Image: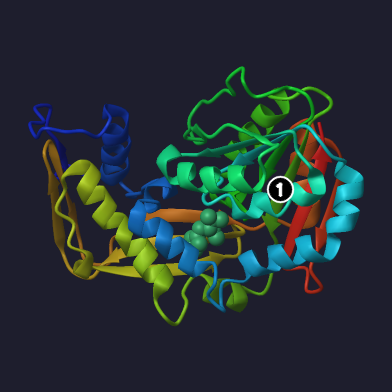
Amino acid sequence: PESNRLNSTASAERTTPAHIIHELENGLLADAAHTSPKYFYDAVGSVLFEAICVLPEYYPTRTEAEIFTTHMADMTNVIGSGGSLIDLGAGNCAKAARLFPVLHPDQYVPIDISVHHLQDAVRRLQQRFPHIEMTALGLDLSQDWQLPVEVRNDKRLFFFPGSSIGNFEPHQALTFLRHLRASCDSSGGILIGVDLIKDKTLLDDAYADTLGVTAAFNLNLLRHINHLLHSDFDVRQWQHEAYFNTEKSRIEMHLRARENIRVSWPGGYRNFIKDEHIHTENSYKYSIDSFVNLLTEAGFSHVSHWTDANAWFAVMYAKA
Ligand code: AVI
């Protein structure tokens, strides 16, 4: 819209990398304003996400954990042991650590956008498992990335739990999976958590919990953007919204303007009219068949999958 501006003479002193400023500005100035879900995870956002994972309404974390507990022996038989375990979006490394005693990796490579967050967890893990070589990497998986040479290419197992693949657009998910396939030889594989299509009410409730933790998680994005962009979002002027879009098979999260709002930052501004919204996240839900097809299209084969009794969530293993 004409009233929304990007001035060429941005002035404030900044520590935020230019490509992040650009990405945020482009998203905020688009006709349908949007932001990348990676900006949820500042210090507060990461803690709020950990809280989401233990909410009664948020079934994915506990359901996935239950699938691992129930089917671990069968999974171990299919996957085998040894090699490099490459943990994509490792966070506190807790999910991968549960695999160490059964998969016995020779090397553990946790990857996260913030390597600082990883370091404490890795130090503690290294004490518990001194014989596993550990290399923490700070990489933004939504950008182009390559594994450095210190990651051994002998039985690379990519571990991507939590249905984080659902936060990619399906075409990006395919590109990402193809990149994983290209990043290992035929001894490699992938172990991935996938959230499945289910009753709309269950899905809606998982992203609009009664305590308002997911609302806080969504709204905290505005505080993080203020920090990165030096913008003046006022959290109180925005309303959390989340619902399952059945046609597109995805949860959509939005922030809706409660009133007419002008948001400014050094170099630009955007006027939002009441009820206009910022699209902050998609979380795609798959059927087992559609995800098996995606893995196959990406070049993986021999897909095995395990689910819970309700078929709410699936863990899949595929060979390279
Ligand atoms: C990290 N990701 C898999 C979560 C999800 O379910 O899409 C993020 C999340 N957003 C709201 N609640 C949880």
Describe residue 112's horizontal placement relative to residue 187 as left or right.
Answer: left
**Rendered location of residue 139, percent (x, y):** 48, 32
Q: From what the image shows, is residue 262 above or below residue 127?
A: below
Residue farthest along the bottom direction in this orientation: 210
Label 1 Cα neighbours within 10 Å, binned few <14 / some 14-19 / many ≥20: many
| Residue at image location 81% in from the left, 50% down from the top | 102
Most foreground residue, 257 or 316: 316
Quarter of the rendering occupied by the C terminus: top right
Describe residue 243's horizontal placement relative to residue 225 as left or right.
Answer: right
- Picture colour scheme: rainbow
Describe residue 298's horizontal placement relative to residue 62 as left or right.
Answer: right
**Rendered location of residue 215, percent (x, y):** 38, 70
In this orientation, does residue 278 appear?
no
**Circle 1 sits on which residue?**
192
| Residue at image location 56% in from the left, 46% down from the top | 90
**Rendered location of residue 185, percent (x, y):** 78, 22
| Residue at image location 73% in from the left, 25% down from the top | 184
Q: Amino acid at mark 1?
A: Ile
Which element carries disc 1, helix, strand or loop? strand
Q: From what the image shows, is residue 63 above or below residue 289?
A: below
Describe residue 182's horizontal placement relative to residue 34 as left or right.
Answer: right
In this orientation, does residue 218 appear?
yes
Residue farthest along the top direction in this orientation: 149
Most foreground residue, 107 or 181: 107
